[in-house]
Image (tube, rainbow, N blue to C red):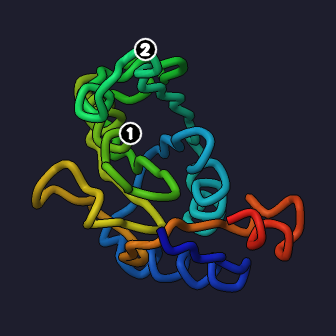
Amino acid sequence: MRRELVSWEEADRLIDHLMSQFEHDFDAMVVITRGGIIPGGMLAEAMDVKHILTAAVDFPAKELESEKDKLLAWPQFIQFPDDEVLGARRVLVVDDVWGSGRTSTAVKNRVSAGGGIPFTCVMHFNPQRNLFGNHRPDYFAASTDAYIIYPWETDRGTDRVLKDY
């Protein structure tokens, strides 16, 4: 799989591109751990969103043998905001990448079930890996088929990260 290293400058450009797409304000943001924490923080700061919540999701499939069974595993919500915090709010659900789409979709559905009005937002959308047909993020900055490495993931240094992949 092709790898792409994103610089901080490119990350800023991606955030700017996302900002230009929003047609309305959001009352709250749910950032998906861990990938959505930094893009969510950048967006919250740029949009002056004060209600920032987190969702931690796991798809436990280690004991499943086939890839198909792993993809069909139900999500476990390790951490999620209470329904009364979400109710009747326009909620931006933020993650870094929409690969298969399972995590963003699970969080969006859970926000909706809690009474919120969810919108999904990612920096990169991978249509080749998407498991949801024509369904895609409401907002995304770029479309790619690459494995993305963000600048906050390169704590070992750029040269070493690229050699490891």
Q: Amino acid at mark 2?
A: Glu
**39 or 70: nearer the viewer:** 70
Residue in view at x 65 percent, y 55 percent? 41
Above or below residue 54? Residue 5 is below
Callout 2 crowding tier (Cα within 10 Å): few <14, some 14–19, many ≥20: few
Above or below residue 59? Residue 54 is below
Residue in view at x 49 percent, y 45 percent? 29
Q: Of all residues shown, which one is farthest toward the right?
A: 156
71 sits left or right of 91 in the view: left
Q: Position of residue 157 (x, y in %)?
A: 88, 68
Residue in view at x 23 percent, y 33 percent? 68
- Circle 2 is placed at which residue position? 63
Callout 1 crowding tier (Cα within 10 Å): few <14, some 14–19, many ≥20: many
Q: Position of residue 101 (x, y in %)?
A: 31, 48
Residues at marks 1 and 2, CA–CA distance in whole angstroms: 19 Å
Give the number of the disc on residue 29: none
Tell me which label, 1 or 2, sits earlier in the chain. Answer: 2
Q: Secondary structure at mark 2?
A: loop
Q: Specify whether residue 84 is in view.
A: no
Residue in view at x 37 percent, y 69 percent? 140
**5 or 68: nearer the viewer:** 68
1 sits left or right of 154 in the view: left
Considering the image in quadrants, where does the C terminus appear? Answer: bottom right
Q: Of all residues shown, which one is farthest toward the left?
A: 134
Q: Specify whether residue 122 is in view.
A: yes
Q: On the image, which quarter does residue 98 sit in? A: bottom left
Q: Secondary structure at mark 1?
A: helix
Above or below residue 92? Residue 146 is below
Q: Amino acid at mark 1?
A: Thr
- Circle 1 is placed at which residue position? 103
Q: Position of residue 70 (x, y in %)?
A: 32, 28
